[in-house]
Amino acid sequence: MDSWSFVSCYRGPDEEETPEEAEREQGTPAITITDLAQFAPDPVTATGEPDNLGVAGMPTNFVAAASAHTRAGALFGTPLTVRFTPVGFDFRYGDGNTASLSSGGQTWSTLGQAPFTPTDSSHTYRERGIYEAGVTVRYAAEVDLGGGWFPVPGELAIDGPAQEIRIFEAHTALVARTCSEQPKAAGC
């Protein structure tokens, strides 16, 4: 009798079997985060607000919508259910800057903010141009083998596709009249 069987046979009434002990008793290999990659959520696309456009020197707001994801299947011949929960968002802005955040951000409208105001997930580009921005979402995983959820150590990182962000320049001019009063004025 191995030590795992011995422990489970003589467990006290208030002692619960850990998922790792249950796995070993069943002869199932320990599950790793790499084993669960076949159940992974789909990649997430980061979008820049407004409409993947921005103005140099002003914040472009980024949002990456990811949520908990559950999928059933079999691993090592054993039926199971896997639940992935997003725990980190690694934004790549395409200009050499990055940000690691705990959320995927929210739209200006959801936040009750005016466009071009800073947010936790916004980025300010210094120069006009076309940038390839993207996000990698990091997920924690839990597995249910039929007896309840238990965490799997590590995180699974899913790279999202690059999104083209166009950044323009804007110039302002002070004028004496509105465009409706003087349609041929500068800036009209």
Image (tube, grey):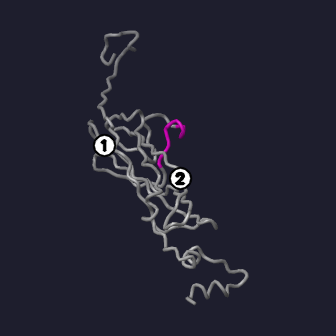
Q: Which residue is mark 2?
A: 69
Q: Which residue is mark 1?
A: 132
Residue at 36% across / 16% down in the picture? 176
Task: Rate crowding at label 1 as few (under 14), some (14 to 19) or many (20 or more) other CA atoms within 10 Å.
Answer: some
The quarter of the image holding the C terminus is top left
Outermost right residue: 13
State the extent of the magenta-drawn residues as a range: 104-112
Image coordinates for residue 41, horizontal then vertical, percent: 47, 52
Is 59 in front, or is 11? 11
Say which amino acid is labelled 1. Answer: Glu
Is 94 displayed left or right of 136 in the figure?
A: left
Label 1 element class: strand
Is 156 in front, or is 130? 156
Up/down of 52 relative to 138, above or below: above
Residue at 35% across / 10% down in the picture? 183
Q: Nearer the viewer, mark 2 or mark 1?
A: 2
Residue 105 sits inside the magenta stretch: yes
Task: Rate crowding at label 2 as few (under 14), some (14 to 19) or many (20 or more) other CA atoms within 10 Å.
Answer: some
Image coordinates for residue 148, horizontal then vertical, percent: 63, 66
Residue at 30% across / 43% down in the picture? 132
Q: Quadrant of residue 23?
A: bottom right
Residue 131 sits inside the magenta stretch: no
The quarter of the image holding the N terminus is bottom right
Up/down of 188 relative to 145, above or below: above
